[in-house]
Image (cartoon, rainbow, N blue to C red):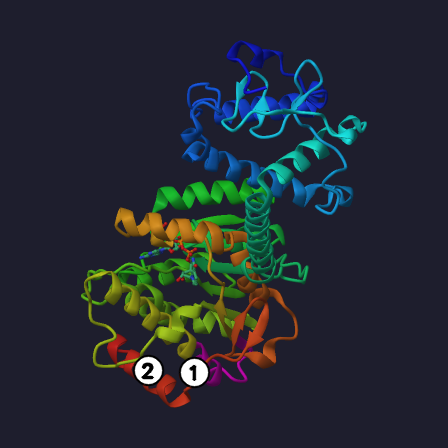
């Protein structure tokens, strides 16, 4: 009665372990505990091993398993019924071990003391339940604590998953443009339509039947996008034209070519943008020039055509980052170095775009041209591609989890280009396919007017 001889361990049998669940658990626990188990010894002869770390780890692991199974188990297996069933390993002569689980041939360290089997051990179908109860009874308090820890971890994970799903469906994904407005006979000019939000916008407008002109700086990328959009929309009225917004003279030549070749312009979408720092060939801050200044000039040069084709629309890409933007007319156009300063310049350019749209709407009142500033949300695109690899990796990871895809990011641009009845909101800021009131700095008409006049002087435009 003092212990189990090593050779006899293989003769241990658990009736419930013959079930598939029992066998799986046996195998799992054998794998779990075998490597760490001390040499087989009769525990009564080496008592120091009884409270060793492997035993604690085993207790915890069993309790953890117990807790997880208990979470999923039917209510019939509640701790209030500890005597209901048992998976206690049995000796071949019908005796069982009081302490120290034995899983197949590998004894878990503990005092092996044969006792009479509990009455309820033969409860039919109670293999899983019996195992839980065995762990619960054997490891008592510790197992319950581990079970509670497991429950807390699972509840925490479930809560996080629920919050993420809520955030994804409410915030990340955003609403779809609700209208189906057809655009047959309309011409759309869109800057930077070869990737990201611009490409997704162009595709949807082409699907609706518009003639779409992508104004892009890179011929190869532009042609590839044209090919994709034609194929996916089935609309061959998609073409590209060369425009480099980092260069004011390119804007002028683009407009000359456009006015010669295109009789109509119904929707102008000032979409192209850069987020990285740098200096344009004309010595301006790159983000300021590409995102704001060149689009100001482009729109200015196309106004007569827009008036001629009225009712027409101008859609200008802003961004939520305008809230960090500043309009400092002494410095806004100056090139800057470094990630943070470049990002600040990007925010400034987006605030400038929102104020510009406001002022443009005022100046175009009664012309039949309306304009809208758009926040597309946070969108997974190549906008961070110029960053150093570490920043790109970080931003890509964040955007993979928390940013919407370009199709969802295009919805507010599509809405502002096509939604009937929003003309009275000309000059306003739109996000998630709704008009929104931006922070006061983006509603400051005095600053908007000063910025307009400053830009006109910079471009040598006289009204
Ligand atoms: N992604 C966002 O989370 C987010 C949020 C708010 C607002 N936005 C705005 O959404 C707009 C589209 O950005 P995106 O996110 O779709 O990024 P994207 O995929 O990088 O698209 C930017 C587009 O602008 C073009 N572009 C850049 N520099 C140009 C230049 N000098 N001349 C002509 N085209 C130029 C790019 O052409 P290349 O391929 O040749 O570079 C590209 O087609 C931008 O105005 C951006 O500020 C984006």
Instruction: Report the number of numbered marks.
Output: 2
Residue 184 at what x, y percent from top left? 63, 56
Residue at the spot of label 2: 451
- Label 2 CA crowd tier, 10 Å (few <14, some 14–19, many 20+): some
Residue at the spot of label 1: 359
Tell me, yes or no, whether the two marked residues, 1 and 2, touch with CB atoms within 8 Å: yes
- Decide which of 54, 154 is in the foreground and name it: 54
Q: Which residues are magenta?
A: 357-370
- Decide which of 326, 359 is in the foreground and name it: 326
- Label 1 CA crowd tier, 10 Å (few <14, some 14–19, many 20+): many
Q: Residue at x 25, y 75 (%)?
A: 332
In what quadrant does ligand 1 lie? bottom left
Asked whether residue 453 is drawn in magenta, I would say no
Q: Which part of the image, by quadrant, shows the N terminus?
A: top right
Q: Residue at x 31, y 56 (%)?
A: 244
Q: CA distance from mark 1 to mark 2?
A: 9 Å
| Helix, strand or loop under label 2 | helix
Residue 452 found in image quarter: bottom left
């Amino acid at each position: 009665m003092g212990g189990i001889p090593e050779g006899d361990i293989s003769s241990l049998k658990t009736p419930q372990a013959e079930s598939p669940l029992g066998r799986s658990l046996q195998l799992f626990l054998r794998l779990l505990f075998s490597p760490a188990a001390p040499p087989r010894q009769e525990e009564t002869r080496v008592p120091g091993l009884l409270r060793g770390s492997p035993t604690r780890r085993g207790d915890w692991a069993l309790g953890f398993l117990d807790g997880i199974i208990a979470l999923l188990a039917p209510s019939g297996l509640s701790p209030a019924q500890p005597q209901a069933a048992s998976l206690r390993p049995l000796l071949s002569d019908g005796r069982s071990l009081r302490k120290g689980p034995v899983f197949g041939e590998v004894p878990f360290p503990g005092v092996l003391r044969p006792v009479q089997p509990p009455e309820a051990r033969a409860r039919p179908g109670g293999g899983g339940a019996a195992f839980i109860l065995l762990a619960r009874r054997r490891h008592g308090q510790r197992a319950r604590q581990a079970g509670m820890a497991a429950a807390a971890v699972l509840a925490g994970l479930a809560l996080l998953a629920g919050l993420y799903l809520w955030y994804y469906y409410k915030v990340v994904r955003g609403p779809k443009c609700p209208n189906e407005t057809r655009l047959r006979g309309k011409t759309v000019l869109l800057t930077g339509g070869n990737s990201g939000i611009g490409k997704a916008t162009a595709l949807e407008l082409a699907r609706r039947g518009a003639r779409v002109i992508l104004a892009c700086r890179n011929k190869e990328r532009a042609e590839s996008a044209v090919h994709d959009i034609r194929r996916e929309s089935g609309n061959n009225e998609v073409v590209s034209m060369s425009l480099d917004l980092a260069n004011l003279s390119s804007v002028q030549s683009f407009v000359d070519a456009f006015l010669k070749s295109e009789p109509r312009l119904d929707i102008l979408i000032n979409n192209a943008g850069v987020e990285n720092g740098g200096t344009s060939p004309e010595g301006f801050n790159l983000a300021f020039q590409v995102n704001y200044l060149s689009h100001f000039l482009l729109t200015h040069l196309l106004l007569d055509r827009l008036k001629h084709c009225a009712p027409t629309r101008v859609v200008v890409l802003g961004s939520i980052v305008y809230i960090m933007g500043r309009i400092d007319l002494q410095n806004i156009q100056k090139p800057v170095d470094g990630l943070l300063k470049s990002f600040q310049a990007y925010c400034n350019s987006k605030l400038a775009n929102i104020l510009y749209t406001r002022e443009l709407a005022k100046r175009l009142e009664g012309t039949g041209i309306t304009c809208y500033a758009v926040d597309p949300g946070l969108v997974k695109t190549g906008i961070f591609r110029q960053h150093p690899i570490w920043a790109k990796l970080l931003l890509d990871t964040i955007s993979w989890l928390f940013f919407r895809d370009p199709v969802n990011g295009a919805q507010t641009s599509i809405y502002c280009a096509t939604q009937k009845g929003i003309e009275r909101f000309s000059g306003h800021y739109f996000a998630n396919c709704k008009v929104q009131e931006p922070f006061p700095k983006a509603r400051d008409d005095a600053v908007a007017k000063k910025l307009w006049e400053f830009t006109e002087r910079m471009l040598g435009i006289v009204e």
